[in-house]
């Protein structure tokens, strides 16, 4: 059996914890803590160390999913979590263009940590103001050979599609 | 006139450092990693220490629960040059303490738990 480590990253509030929670077959190891600075956000909780989940793709393949915190002050966790990853997903909140710059910055950092494969997931596509993936690609200046996949992190089937796209990318690169 | 919360917490941290000679520095951090009161040396990057304290405590909490050790009381890190000890202050905050390698840990633990109780009261009252 093969195990593959995948990291789910992206800016604050992008939906990383939701993404792993939607797909994991084990109870997610989460480190959600109450947000104390409410000028920043309306949501109740934020990730302070990591999320961890697992999904069996088939008899031969198990994915270990590690979610990062989104806030900059936890960036020391980004590097720790990126160790040994085979691929990563940059989740972007498609209704929050003010976070696109940060998303690009995180993408560059992760590319720097490791030459692993990655896809960009245009999350929250169920919301009516969501930027479509092709517009997000332009805004974030994503290379043409990198996939920008539509995503609804709260929907298991959608999360599955994003993970499969990443796995295909990993396989394609391995064959090259 | 009532003193502001930060001031009260800072005074309590200084008192802790005065009673426990092994303790070199201390801080109170919110559970989501923001500094609330700090008696850390100037060269320490407060923002990073506070984020790391919150991350470490949350992981300690999970592992204690996962392995049936109950509610987390303390996380303790021992380096060549001394200790970093974290303990929770109620549900809302973390007490982070740096102690010398030669510190008497029993005393440090005792003084820390007293300080944590007082700090929790300050948080509840102010
Ligand atoms: N409508 C909608 N809401 C979503 C989607 N994904 C996440 N959310 C919501 O967005 C908010 C943030 O989700 P989280 O999973 O906490 O985001 P995160 O990236 O883990 O955030 P941090 O750990 O704080 O950086 C929550 O209120 C989620 O319910 C989505 O696809 N659609
Ligand atoms: Mg999260």
Image (tube, coloured by chain):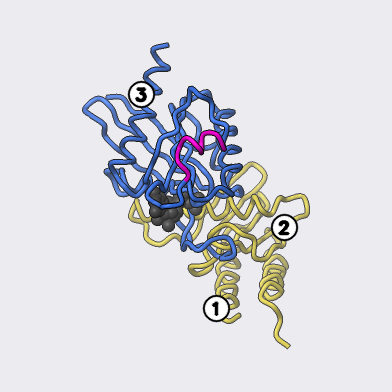
Chain colours: A blue, B yellow
Along the viewing direction, whichever of A113 and B65 lies nearer the viewer = A113
Residue B121, above or below A176: below
Around disc 2, counting alpha carbons within 10 Å, would you say few (fewer than 14), some (14 to 19), or many (20 or more)?
Answer: some
Residue at point 64% right, 52% down? B49
**Residue annotated with mark 3:** A168
Around disc 3, counting alpha carbons within 10 Å, would you say few (fewer than 14), some (14 to 19), or many (20 or more)?
Answer: few
**Residue annotated with mark 2:** B40
Query: Do circles 2 and 3 both sit on a common chain?
Result: no
Residue A62, above or below B112: above
Residue at point 61% right, 38% down? A105
Along the viewing direction, whichever of B24 and B29 lies nearer the viewer = B29
In this view, the mark in front (2 or 1)? 1
Chain to which the residue tagged by mark 1 belongs: B
Along the viewing direction, whichever of A36 and A14 lies nearer the viewer = A14
Residue at point 78% right, 54% down? B42
Q: Give x and y (percent) for residue B6.
A: 68, 72
View extreme (left): residue: A59
* The residue stretch that appears in magenta: A131-139
Disc 2 to disc 3: CB gap under 8 Å: no
Chain to which the residue tagged by mark 3 belongs: A
């Amino acid at each position: 059996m093969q195990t593959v480590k995948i990291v789910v990253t992206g800016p604050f509030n992008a939906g990383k914890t939701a993404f792993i929670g939607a797909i994991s077959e084990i109870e997610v190891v989460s480190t959600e803590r109450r947000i104390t600075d409410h000028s920043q956000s309306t949501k109740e909780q934020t990730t302070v160390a990591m999320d961890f989940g697992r999904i069996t793709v088939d008899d031969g393949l198990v994915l270990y999913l590690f979610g990062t915190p989104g806030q900059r002050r936890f960036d020391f966790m980004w590097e720790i979590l990126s160790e040994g990853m085979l691929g990563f997903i940059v989740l972007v909140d498609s209704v929050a263009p003010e976070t696109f710059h940060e998303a690009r910055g995180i993408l560059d950092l992760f590319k720097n940590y490791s030459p692993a494969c990655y896809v960009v997931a245009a999350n929250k596509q169920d919301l009516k103001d969501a930027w479509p993936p092709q517009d997000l690609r332009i805004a974030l200046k994503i290379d043409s050979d990198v996939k920008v996949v539509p995503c609804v992190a709260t929907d298991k089937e959608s999360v599955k599609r994003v993970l499969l796209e990443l796995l295909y990318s990993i396989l394609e690169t391995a064959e090259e | 006139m009532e003193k502001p919360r930060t001031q009260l917490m800072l005074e309590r941290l200084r008192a802790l450092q005065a009673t426990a000679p092994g303790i070199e520095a201390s801080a109170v951090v919110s559970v989501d990693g923001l500094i609330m009161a700090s008696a850390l040396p100037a060269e320490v990057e407060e923002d990073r220490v506070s984020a790391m304290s919150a991350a470490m405590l949350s992981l300690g909490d999970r592992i204690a629960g996962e392995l049936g050790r109950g509610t987390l009381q303390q996380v303790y890190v021992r380096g060549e040059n001394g200790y970093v000890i974290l303990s929770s202050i109620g549900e809302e905050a973390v007490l982070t303490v740096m102690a010398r390698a030669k510190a008497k840990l029993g005393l440090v633990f005792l003084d820390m738990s007293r300080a944590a109780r007082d700090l929790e009261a300050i948080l509840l009252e102010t």
